[in-house]
Image (cartoon, helix red, strand yellow):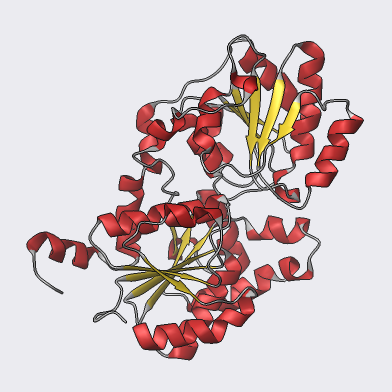
Amino acid sequence: MQKSPAHVAIFLRCLFGGGVERVMVNLANSFIECGLKVDLVLAHKSGPYLSLVAPSIRIIDLKSPQLAASIPKLISYLQQEQPLSMLSALHYPSEIAIFAKKAARVKTRVVIAEHNTLSVEAKNLPQRTAQLTPLAARIFYSWADAIVAVSQGVANDLAQVIKLPYDQIKVIYNPVITPDILERSQQPISHPWFASGEPPVILGVGRLIEQKDFPTLIRAFAQVRSVRPARLMILGIGSERNYLNQLIQELDLENDVAILGFQENPYAYMARASVFALSSAWEGLPTVIIEALAVGTPVVSTNCPSGPAEILASGKYGWLVPVGDSQAMAKYILEVLSGNFKTVDSKWLNQFTCSEVVSKYLDVLHLNQYIEAQALNFTV
């Protein structure tokens, strides 16, 4: 047991290899660098990002593979440890965090971060739980001490879903660009497709699920390859892998498409790709676009709700195409491969750096006073 409570706890399901989990690890590590005490509270301790967690972060394993089973354990944690603030991300963990605080009857400040456009997700996913998400958010989110949305689009959608004024939702972009991202992008990779003289590689990164709409990217690639030699590489795991493999076979693309699974260092692939393509049907703030821009790779993305248009400044820094339009995606991938691509102003990317974002989270978590106390060498 700690002699004093953590300044901040971060509650998540696990550290599975998604963009949200990577963002939360970035935040946790940044909080430690600020001199705060951090507990990373996981429903179950698993996932490839565990290796990225700073050693001085205390990991609390609630040992609950089923998220709902973590509720009494999270209540107990809050009652025993009473962190000053707790941050949670994604709607199911966020609802549990809010309920646990109420049940524990503690003063911990609970801040939730919404990373998706809930109304679009509810319309597109077949699961009953997803369809009920807007109703659950409307019930629980108003109990949070503060609500963060990761993009203006998510904030607009969330305000309508939960029937709260827009100005009660704080927009904070994700801390995607870390100090080591360029260094990691230069690390060697052995895949033969990146050898000198090989055709250009188009890269997609994300979970192999309906939201990411990789079938549109694969169909777009088929059109690109009918015009010129190229290859498509996808990094990610998920439930649609078999379906995607069948589509690849149907389009006779087996020799030119590779699904490599989860890669801990996607930046090295991004830096070597000729085009980064995002085919998502909906998002919140797709971190992979920011990562690609940070390592200098041109981007073609669907103009889905929400995030791509904000990241790309409405098309100034990358090509935006309609959702599900493989022909338009192919057209602009070919534009980039022909040398017609858009470069990004490095100053524009500052808003996605850890240093810029962390200060905003410290403010909404009410932890700035503890950072100031550290600087003055006394305890608050």
Residue at image coords 49%, 27%:
188
- Work out whether residue 324 or residue 36 is closer to the camera in this orientation and state it: 36
- Whether residue 163 is visible, yes or no, is no
Q: Is residue 75 left or right of residue 239?
A: left
Name the quadrant of the N terminus.
Answer: bottom left
* Nearer-the-camera pick, 45 or 355: 45
With 371 as the anchor, is 318 left or right in this view? right
Q: Nearer the viewer, residue 191 or 235?
A: 191
Depth order, front residue of 267/163? 267
187 shown above or below 85: above
In this picture, residue 202 sits left or right of residue 342? right
Task: Say which residue appears at 82% left-offset and 28% top-offset.
Answer: 254
Which residue appears at 53% of the width and 82% of the height? 99
Residue 34 in sight in this render = yes
In terms of image quadrants, where is residue 91? bottom right
The answer to which image quadrant residue 63 occupies is: bottom right
**In which quadrant of the rendered image does the C terminus lie?**
bottom left
Residue 127: image location, x then y, percent: 79, 65
Query: In the rendered view, does 83 fall on the left or right side of 375?
Result: right
Query: Where is residue 347 drawn, in percent x and y?
Result: 35, 31
The x, y position of residue 133, in whole percent, is: 67, 69
Q: Give residue 348's position: percent from left, percent from top.
A: 39, 33
